[in-house]
Image (cartoon, rainbow, N blue to C red):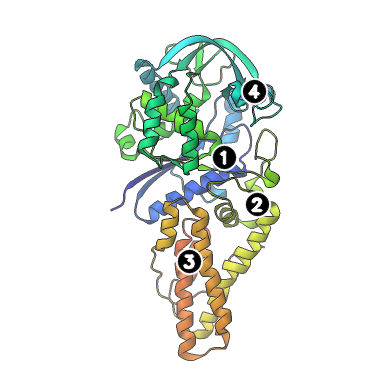
Amino acid sequence: MGQDFYITTTLPYVNSDPHIGFALEIIRADVLARYHRLIGDEVFFNTGTDEHGQKIYQKALDEKREPQEYVDEYAAKFGRLKEALNLSYDNFIRTTDKHHVKAAQEFWKIVEKNEYIYKKNYKVKYCVGCELEKTDSDLEDGFCPDHPGKKLEIREEENYFFRFSAFEDKLLMLYESNYKFVVPANRQKEVKNFVGSGLKDFSISRLKEKMPWGVPVPGDETQIMYVWFDALVNYISALGWPENMENFSKWWPGVQIAGKDNLRQQSAMWQAMLMAADLPNSKQILINGFILSGGQKMSKSVGNVVDPFEYIEKYGTDALRYFLLAKISPFEDSDFIRERFEETYTSDLVNGLGNLVARVVGLSHLGGVKDSHPRGVISVEVEKALERFGFDKALELIWDKIREADKLINEKEVWKLEGEEKRKILTDLVNTIRQIGVDLQPFLPETAKKIIKQFTGPKIVRGKNLFERL
């Protein structure tokens, strides 16, 4: 009997077009969702868009537009990823949704009732690019390292604060009791060091007269919620919290997929907020690294992002999915280089998988091999790799089978064989292709579907190379 499995991405900030970094995050979440469905689990897969905060408000002002109109346009662009990347998510939440706004306010009221929210005057350095307060130790040459050259704001006003400092010991106990709370281990160590060095209370509201675009603070018309406090609540509001507690209890806690830049927010801030509201903590967070060619970090603020739609249009969805899953490390910074992508497309997909399927189909017709239904069960070694979030390792195992099958055809010169010897080798090859099709379902769903269809039925179906482009 399967289990209930809840998985969510972080919510991308809609201050620019979708980029390859978020495509990487949501594709990995999609693989895990598809995999859990295949092994019989009931899955709820959540994603969406983060639509409040000063960056968005300022962008809307710069373009002389209403903030809601602005976020509607960009939310639609992120919504296009579902078809473009062949995603299987069940829910797309927007932080401007009425239900989410209501849930964020209810969450605030609970945390305030539990005495973890208070009001005070303060002065702080603030990076608008990160939507985060910065201490001198966070800075490099006086600038935020994630937004070099972007002048920090000095903010002085009366806001509400979250008693983050009250959760230092509790967070450390959480990490200690669950050594896989943050994956990989070096990221768990990083967040433990952050928490262990001492936590400071942080501001969770802004003056409405200065920045009105956000969720109103309940009971105080002069303040709106800090964007991070509001946005993080999406992980539970997406489940119907607080009205539908039955649905919430069914799915929560869940697994979060996050980029390493969100490590502190997701695995410390959010977990402390859950403790403050007397709610269970998330199970795990998977942290992904990503950089561009030449060691430069990918950043919307410096305009060096890669457009996923460009690659999808030219090479197809599964080609992009394959490269991001197979050639970008799940846990370390990796390069995205166009030339490497194109080489991978040709070697692994066109001349690798596509050519093998075409060869086996052709030889099977000549050898008279008939079809039987594929097993339909993912191979054990691929399952083990996925359980450890080894997307690249799982695909490496599948491509080992592809290379071995090609090697067998060449070494045996199968096209020259006849009779029972040929039939036996081709039967083994067909079974290998069927298993490859089954194993590829979470990773390259459309390609897997084509392979399974081609090798299922009264006879093996001819067709063009799976990755032949018009």
- How many residues crowd around disc 1 within 10 Å: few (fewer than 14), some, or many (20 or more)? many
Contact (Cβ within 8 Å) of mark 1 with mark 3: no
Q: Secondary structure at mark 3?
A: helix
Q: Secondary structure at mark 2?
A: helix
Q: Secondary structure at mark 4?
A: helix
Of labels 4 and 2, earlier in sequence is 4
Q: Position of residue 275 (x, y in %)?
A: 36, 26
The residue wearing badge 2 is 311
The residue wearing badge 4 is 58
Residue type beneath disc 1: Phe
Residue type beneath disc 2: Tyr
Q: Is residue 436 above or below residue 364?
A: above
The residue wearing badge 3 is 436
The residue wearing badge 1 is 78
Quadrant in which the C terminus appears = bottom right
Q: Is residue 322 visible?
A: yes
